[in-house]
Image (cartoon, helix red, strand yellow):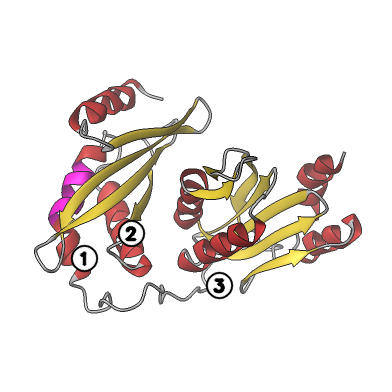
Amino acid sequence: MAGPAREELVALAAIFCGPDEWEVLSRSETDGTIFKILTKAEGLTDADVPLELVFHLPVNYPSCLPGISVNSEHLTRAQCVAAKEKLLEQAGNLLSKPMVHELVLWIQQNLRHILNQPEMGSGSGKCTFTASMTVDDGLWITLLHLDHMRAKTKYVKTVEKWASDLRLTGRLMFMGKIILILLQGDRNNIKEYLILQKTFKVDVDSSGKKCKEKMISVLFETKVQTEHKRFLAFEVKEYSSLDELQKEFETAGLKKLFSEFVLGLVK
């Protein structure tokens, strides 16, 4: 991570020094740094809305945009997604310089205006966005590997909800002890999915206590190519044999991906 980015992290830790305001969730020389900031912003009724902002700074930040996730128990998922997209737009204007504090100040000052948009409303927590598979410019595909799922029913429902909220299609695949998640959609939405996957308590440990996912790996990521199938929905599927799983990848135009990354998991 570049020097200015490291200095920014130190400054942010000093600025957000209140109880639970700042937490570093993970650091990696290859994946960058993920951290959480708890703050408040003025809502529609002049009352402060608590916000949980999760930022992922890749190793080449600030030369590239950070990953951003916005969550709040006081907002619907559609409102959180809208706030995130506005933050990413703002981040695009600040590229090449440390921007996190500026983004936090911006959302504090502008959340009310975002929520005041006619399409936001104040209804249910269901996101009303629809996925368009006719435009491929922003379409990416990512393959994830999970080591295990202890609380499988809850975990699966959570993954399905995140995929729906973020307009991602693909597959959650089970074959014996192998667990794979194939995601297709906008790259920024895939990045937000990864942030959610790594920062929320989606499973339980051996003692039954809720825990975050620490054993997930990104096997492959690329822009969707012409030979790749466009998935129309996100589905959970169980496979009884390796041949059946391989056929799923071949049908999706991902035969090479299966050979290079999936076969090795069987050994």
Q: What residue type is labelled 2?
A: Glu
Q: Which of marks 1 and 3 is in front?
A: 1
Specify whether residue 250 is in view.
yes
Against 7, residue 166 (above or below) is below
Q: Look at 65% across and 40% down and name the residue there.
A: 206
Q: Mark 2 points at which residue?
A: 85
Q: Look at 35% across and 69% down and name the residue there.
A: 78
Look at the magenta stretch and give its main secondary structure: helix
Q: Position of residue 257 (x, y in %)?
A: 75, 49
Q: What residue type is labelled 1?
A: Ile
Q: Nearer the viewer, mark 3 or mark 2?
A: 2
The reply to whether the C-beta atoms of the residues labelled 1 and 2 are less than 8 Å apart is: no
Q: Look at 50% across and 53% down and name the residue there.
A: 193
Q: Nearer the viewer, residue 253 or 152?
A: 152
Against 156, residue 95 (above or below) is above
Against 195, residue 137 (above or below) is below
Quarter location, residue 246: bottom right
Quick one: which residue is furthest to the front in this view?
Answer: 207
Tell me, for residue 133, which label it has, or none.
3
Which residues are the magenta region? Answer: 102-109
Q: Which amino acid does label 3 sit on?
A: Met
**Separation (CA) of disc 3 from disc 2:** 19 Å
Q: Position of residue 255 (x, y in %)?
A: 81, 55
In what element is the residue under mark 1?
A: helix
Could you tell which of marks 1 and 2 lies nearer the N-terminus? 2
